Amino acid sequence: VQFLLDNFWDLSVTGLTQGAIYALIALGYTLVYGVLRLINFAHSEVFVTGTFASIFVLHAFGLGSDDPVPSAGMVVLYIAAAAVGAMVASAATALVVERVAYRPLRRRNAPPLVFLISAIGASFAISEAFGVLVDRNNVRVPNLIEPQTQFHLFGASVNNRQLLIVAAAIVMMLCLDQFIRRTRLGRGIRAVSQDPDSAALMGVNKDRVIALTFILGGLMAGGAAVLYDLQFGVTRFNAGFVLGIKAFTAAVLGGIGNLRGALLGGLLLGLMENYGSAIIGSEWRDVVAFVFLIVVLMFRPTGILGESLGKARA
Amino acid sequence: VRFQRMARMTVTAAVVALAAAGCGSSDGSGGSGDAGSCKYQIGYFGALTGDSANLGINIRNGAKLAIDQYNKDAKDCVGLKEFDSAGDPAQAPGLARKAVTDKTVLGIIGPAFSGESKAANGTFDQGKLPIITASATNPALADNGWKIFHRILGNDASQGPAAARYIKDVMKAPKVFVVDDATEYGKGLATIVKSDLGSAVIGTDTVQAKQTDFAATVTKIKASGAKAFFYGGYYAEGGLLRKQLTDAGGKDIVMVAADGVKDPGFVKAAGQAAAEGTILTCPCLPPSKTKGTFAADYKAAFKVDAGTYSGEAFDAATVFIEGIKAGKTTREALNDFIGSFHGEGVTKSIAFDAKGEVTDKVIWAYKVKAGQIVEEQEIK
């Protein structure tokens, strides 16, 4: 406990950085759940596709794994290009998952359990495909940001990369939030999530809204993928497995179906994991995270902020 | 209802197909060359896929080289049958049963890792199928009374103290942090290193396989003021931990790890800059120090330099082949043959004691230099 107190801010900074990535992935789970009342277990692979796509883009620019960090202007360009590549690839993967693993079943009114299984199947298929493609090796991300301490927060150093990750994640989430609240397409998503049948009667194209929801989740996962690449500098075919479970947990923690809940849940989960590891040892990290989830659900069964994608400014 | 049933069936079929496609690659009973047509086979048991597959592939290739060389001018060929465990102790017992029931398999090279060895060796013992592991280094493996168990390299009871000696005597690090990955191998090794370093250990932590975010561990290492840290585990996590520690400003804290990290995959995961200067111990002989033409033959056959334990696997396969050559073509006879075997391998003189441990042990220290893992010195 003394260690936690001594390093409280340091652990908070790293916990928030990890939490921001959880939160971005959690959005994908939450969006799909809000509209379809289904968990898209292939979302972790939507994310993994993004991590590989951004590396692919960077390699296409001729950046090698152990090249020195390019100049600042180029770095911005590279990151932007990698982000676009990852977001497009992730969104495309999400769309394909929807078309292959969801839409045919929806047409036949399959029970929810079947969707779950087909999503898990899609998840394995994509993950194993990457495993075969890269020989199950770690794949390096070219160095783009050399972490440099920018300022100190109560004694904890905060570096440029951590700032970028947290800032980028929050900006993306704000954009998504505004998109859902203010635009016509966003209104469609909210309508379908509140009452699919009435929405259809009012002229909302349900299939299009669902596809859009998957794409939005994919875009967020693509963003998370670039930030993950920058943070860890390496990806592998099964990188999404644990991360996906954690992000799903974050979504449930904040209130599944609730965008702001995903943000809150992600950040809280990142912090709790770090504090838990600090107090009783890193081997208890997952135990702490899930005990925390269970305790929260005991008192708030719908998560901290409750389920409310549709009801957001209804 | 009819629609539902149809949908359900379609999905079940699709999932089964996907699962089959996914597992197809990890089933791996392919074997090498004309394995199926040979009268006798030697099995390779260990990871060919999964997070730490590189370590297993080195071993498989070393064994394959020995068998291919023998087959070139033998009238009765010997096959190499692969049992890919993905390094997963949960898969090991079933796979071991599969090997035992295949009566053409006379011996097993492996299991590669300590965790899967613990899970599988009991089955091999019941099936009287002799095994020679070229890499599983957990000392306790030899204490189970398995009559079929042989280990062709020094175990962690010699590697752990050697690592500790290197930290104390060569690096002269007064403060050391110890991290393990909670596996049979990593935890066992870290425990030995901890007890040998004694009061120099100023903190410990445990991480998990497949973990990618080591922020809490990094904070602990930094806060402890350690000059060096020992990592007991495999390269996939070790590389990430090294990189994250460097990124967090812990560049000068030297990483010491053992054979599970001694793979180019470590440098790949950590990045060349962060990996630089890492010390790796290994009860394996540097390929350049192996006897005869082994290093050159390996390079010619696989287009890469011999890896960790390729030479040891070559020797293990050679012991089996010598047995088969001597007409020991039942599992029991072959096991007795191995027990009394004396001979020169490419890595060491081979003879096993009553517990199945090789009598001649060598431990080397390696260092990461400019992205390459190069030999530093033998640890006496």
Image (spheres, rainbow, N blue to C red):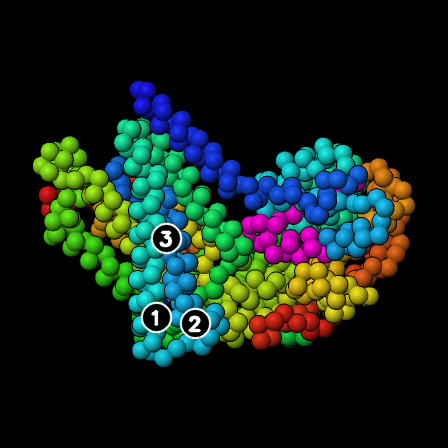
The residue at 53%/72% (across/down) is B272
The chain containing the residue under callout 3 comes to A
In terms of depth relative to the viewer, which is nearer, A167 or B308?
Answer: B308
Let me know if residue B53 is in the magenta part.
yes
Let me know if residue B81 is in the magenta part.
no
> What amino acid type should be assigned to the residue bearing mark 1?
Tyr
Q: Which residues are magenta?
A: B40-63
The residue at 15%/55% (across/down) is A178
Q: Which callout, 2 or 3, points to the residue nearer the camera?
A: 2
> What amino acid type should be assigned to the residue bearing mark 3?
Phe
Q: Which callout, 3 or 1, points to the residue nearer the camera?
A: 1
Which residue corresponds to mark 1?
A: A78
Q: Which mark is residue A47?
A: 3
Share a chain, discs 2 and 1? yes
Give residue B102's position: percent from left, percent from top. Answer: 72, 34
Q: Answer yes or no: is residue B144 visible.
A: no
The chain containing the residue under callout 1 comes to A
The residue at 34%/74% (across/down) is A75
Q: Answer yes or no: is residue B365 visible.
A: yes
When the figure is inspected, residue B286 is found, relative to residue B143, above or below; the finding is below
Q: Is residue A170 left or right of residue B166?
A: left
